[in-house]
Image (cartoon, rainbow, N blue to C red):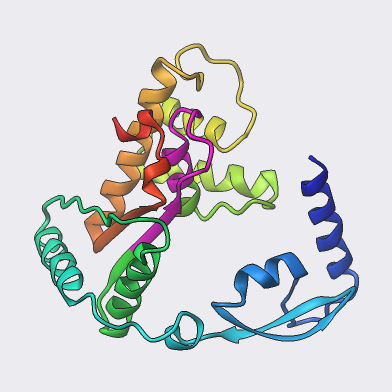
């Protein structure tokens, strides 16, 4: 759409002025990143320089309270660290601090030196796309970014062979990530049918593999928007 094209043009302008070793972001991106990163001087054409990451207390404010919630999350993680599945939900009204609590949990685990994998996906605002929340988590765990070249995305999908993932599941992942796949009636990603089953199985396989090596957290932010098929 027009907004997307304008953003691409803005990013292209940055590429013409950025220097080697420098990270610059558009004005739109700077507004979204200001609570997580220290930004340099603004420039109409060169955007803003991303200097370094802020400490949590600087960007988000000092974390106070929530001892009971942190304790309960710790108990759930203790269960999971023993090799058992643990499912937890952080519930509350918009703005109540659910995302902040999730960020703090990850920060404390890293600072304590725990070898824990934390993967956070945001559920799309559109809730009528089947398995959209599953697709977003696959993007996160595979490290797929919005403007990544198609060849790079294909390489990441191809690496799923190393997990022993069968072709129908890999093709379902490829389709979910917007890649063209040769017609295959048994693996076509459609609103209902084998495509859904293959995509669910693909995420389950990736999750199990990641959890074999270390305690791993998979979290969906804005889970109230999760589509029915992903919740099933």
Question: Residue 149: percent from the left, percent from the top?
Answer: 70, 49
32 vs 115, left or right, is right
Image point (33%, 32%), residue name: 201
Q: Is residue 178 magenta?
A: no
Position above or below: 62 against 218: below
Where is the C terminus found, in terms of image quarters?
top left
Residue at the farthest top position: 185
Question: Residue 84: percent from the left, percent from the top?
Answer: 11, 52
**Residue 21 placement: quadrant:** bottom right
Q: Which of 229 and 148 is in front in this view?
A: 229
Q: Which of 182 and 73 is in front in this view?
A: 73
Q: Is residue 26 visible?
A: no
Where is the N terminus found, in terms of image quarters?
top right
Image point (51%, 82%), residue name: 59
Which segment is the magenta one? 118-138
Image point (47%, 39%), residue name: 135
Position above or below: 77 against 228: below
Question: Residue 76: percent from the left, percent from the top?
Answer: 14, 61
Position above or below: 134 against 152: above
Question: Residue 171: percent from the left, percent from the top?
Answer: 50, 29
- Number of callouts in the render? 0
Q: Is residue 117 visible?
A: yes
149 vs 165, left or right, is right
Q: Nearer the viewer, residue 57 or 181?
A: 57
Q: Nearer the viewer, residue 125 or 172?
A: 125
Q: Does the magenta stretch include residue 122?
A: yes
60 vs 44, left or right, is left
């Amino acid at each position: 759409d027009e907004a997307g094209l304008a953003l691409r043009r803005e990013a292209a302008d940055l590429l013409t002025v950025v220097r080697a070793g420098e990270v610059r972001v558009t004005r739109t991106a700077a507004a979204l990143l200001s609570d997580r990163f220290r930004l340099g001087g603004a420039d109409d054409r060169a955007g803003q320089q991303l200097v370094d990451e802020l400490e949590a207390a600087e960007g988000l404010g000092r974390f106070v309270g929530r001892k009971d919630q942190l304790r309960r999350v710790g108990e759930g993680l203790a269960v999971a660290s023993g090799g058992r599945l643990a499912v937890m939900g952080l519930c509350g009204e918009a703005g109540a601090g659910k995302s902040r609590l999730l960020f703090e949990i990850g920060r404390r685990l890293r600072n304590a030196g725990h070898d824990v994998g934390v993967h956070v996906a945001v559920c799309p605002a559109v809730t009528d796309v089947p398995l959209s929340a599953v697709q977003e988590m696959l993007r996160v765990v595979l490290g797929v970014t919005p403007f990544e070249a198609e060849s790079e995305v294909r390489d990441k999908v191809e690496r799923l062979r190393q997990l022993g993932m069968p072709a129908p599941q890999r093709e379902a992942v490829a389709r979910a990530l917007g890649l063209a796949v040769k017609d295959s009636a048994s693996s076509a990603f459609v609103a209902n049918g084998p495509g859904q089953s293959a995509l669910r199985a693909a995420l389950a396989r990736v999750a199990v593999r990641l959890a074999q090596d270390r305690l791993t957290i998979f979290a969906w932010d804005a889970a109230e928007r999760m589509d029915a098929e992903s919740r099933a």
